[in-house]
Image: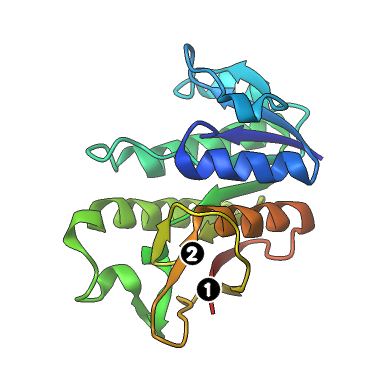
Amino acid sequence: MNIALIGSTGQIGREITQQLLAHPHAVTALLRPGRVLPGELAAALPLAVNLQDEAELARALTGHDVLVSAYAPPPDQADALPLMTARLVRAARQAGVRRVMVVGGAGSLYLAPGQQLVDSPMFPAAYKAIALAHREALAVLQAADDLDWTFFAPAALIEPGARRGGYRVGRDRLIADADGQSRISYGDYAEAFAREVTQGEHLRAVVTAAYA
């Protein structure tokens, strides 16, 4: 499978890229000009792309089977996330790439019918702006009924760590363990994400993974 990936130099994106290469897939890492891939991702093909240029993005995506985005804007520019998502959707259409899979936000998961995590009183104020931006990005995907999109949200807490297994994958709702904690490591999240890229079991859906 030929995969175009945005965000491979970030913490989550780096882990996802490693997992995709291990499956193995052919991964093209779309990088901002001047960025370089970390040494452990040497098997990926680097391609410099202006992410703000929709036509250039479409040219870079042409010939790929899947677009994966682990794009993360600077903390003070959360509004860039839904704008980038809309740009990626348009570029994917132009390039004829039907599958689009993005790293989502846990704030868009439901605690109960009609109540998303981001709207709960316990949601940390420091992360609310980016969580709301992820929800806007999800709305962009949901409107793209001509694409097979997947919004893959992590657990409420995603933190550095290797794969340990014992996680569960589900749709729409926040997953918590027996102690009521919703957690997952970068390594396990990336493994679950890469498996979904490969298998395509949850199309046009919100998916999450967390320790059970």
Scheme of image coloration: rainbow
Q: Is residue 140 left or right of residue 57?
A: left
Q: Is residue 125 left or right of residue 211?
A: left
Compared with 73, 136 (above or below) is: below
In terms of depth relative to the viewer, which is nearer, 210 or 120?
A: 210
Q: Secondary structure at mark 2?
A: strand
- Residue 11, position in %: x, y? 46, 41
The disc, 2 or 1, on the residue closer to the chain's N-terminal end is: 2
Based on the displayed image, in which of its 4 quarters is residue 37 positioned?
Answer: top right
Q: Are marks 2 and 1 in contact (CB under 8 Å)?
A: yes
Callout 1 amino acid? Tyr
Tag on residue 211? 1
- Residue 185, position in %: x, y? 49, 59
Q: Callout 1: few (<14), some (14-19), or many (20+) C-alpha neighbours within 10 Å? A: many
- Residue 39, position in %: x, y? 60, 24
Tag on residue 184? 2
- Residue 122 can be seen in this image: yes
Q: Residue at x 40, y 40 (%)?
A: 72
Quadrant (top left, top right, bottom left, bottom right) of the C terminus: bottom right
Quadrant (top left, top right, bottom left, bottom right) of the N terminus: top right
Q: Residue at x 24, y 69 (%)?
A: 123
